[in-house]
Amino acid sequence: MMIIIAEFFVVILKVLWAFLTAGAKWVMRPKEKSVAGQVCVITGAGSGLGRLFAKEFARRRAILVLWDINSQSNEETAEMVRQIYHELDTPITKDGPVGGVEEVPPFQPQVYTYVCDVGKRESVYSTAEKVRREVGEVDILINNAGVVSGHHLLECPDELIERTMVVNCHAHFWTTKAFLPKMLELNHGHIVTVASSLGLFSTAGVEDYCASKFGAIGFHESLSHELKASEKDGINMTLVCPYLVDTGMFKGCRIRKEIEPFLPPLKPEFCVKQAMRAILTDQPMICTPRIVYMVNFMKSILPFEAIVCMYRFLGADKCMYPFLAQRKEAMNNNEAKNGI
């Protein structure tokens, strides 16, 4: 009994220390690690946040491996990366797998593109094997690819629901299974899950999307605990949960007009820069803007009816309805043009 009590007090001290160190990081920004020369796989790199992540990692001299289902847009991203590489020609250093720094020869432009449908596990595994064979072992995995069906639940075809779940959630299992074994062997790596605030708290009309993002976050957190339990402290995990990002994915989504100036959609560039700072300082989780932390905490302690009242006040209860209406109208217009 005395041992348990003693351990309990030790736990309390460790929790307090964790609070202190976390608070200190808010005041004093930690030094960013170098990813120069490290192999970074980015899914969904052909547009949106994936393209911006590729440009940011290129500026930091990482070796980019770009995955996307669209070959043309993926190549466009690669060309942007090459342009950034062209401006970088000075010698670099690279973090070693077990600490320390090793010198790397003068920088050479290196970007690889692969057409991969992450919604098909065979495509993921075969593409991952090509990457290992043609590029080498992966140091950083950015699980970014995502889709949205844009239909109310009862109007959404089952195929689209399955597609949303597979791309937004199941694909994380497959990419991780493909690249994690070598990370475990070397005790070195970084896995990033680009989720959403809609994986922390939900809203009406996007049941499939919310479920997929809740699943991705659950997978990420469980894997984080597994790595801690395995004492693989050289492998880092970062969860990215942004508020609505102005990439066009949820075009038309609106909260209450009086509130919107205080909570506008995030600029994609700002979102990625915040995420990059979290990744490069090994921060476990980043919510943008910071009010998302508070909303998530309040959801955990308030009664459901209180949450409903808050949603209605903010206009968040039906914020997706304009988006869904636009998607439905666009689909009807396409069907009319095709003579359906």
Image: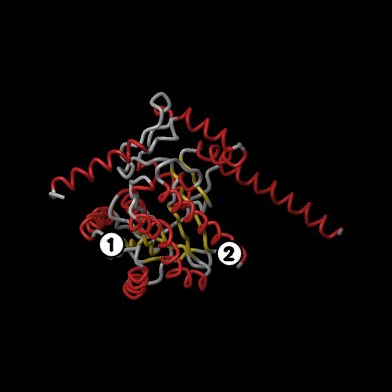
Q: Residues within 10 Å of mark 2 (few under 14, many from 20)?
A: few
Q: How far apart, in angstroms, are the residues tagged by discs 2 and 1?
A: 36 Å
* Quadrant in the rendering for residue 81: bottom left
| Contact (Cβ within 8 Å) of mark 2 with mark 1 | no
The residue identified by callout 1 is: 109
The residue identified by callout 2 is: 226
Residue 168 percent coordinates (x, y):
40, 56
Q: Which residue is nearer to you in this view: 311 or 105?
A: 311
Q: Residue at x 35, y 71 (%)?
A: 122
Residue 258 percent coordinates (x, y):
41, 23
Residue type, mark 1 in image: Pro
Q: Secondary structure at mark 2?
A: helix
Task: Tell me how the rendering is colored.
Answer: secondary structure
The mark nearer the N terminus, 2 or 1, is 1
Residue 7 percent coordinates (x, y):
78, 57
* Quadrant in the rendering for residue 179: bottom left
- Which label lies toward us, 2 or 1? 2
Residue 84 percent coordinates (x, y):
27, 53
Screen quadrant of the N terminus: bottom right
Task: Point out the residue furthest to the right here.
Answer: 2
Residue type, mark 2 in image: Glu
Q: Residue at x 60, y 37 (%)?
A: 303
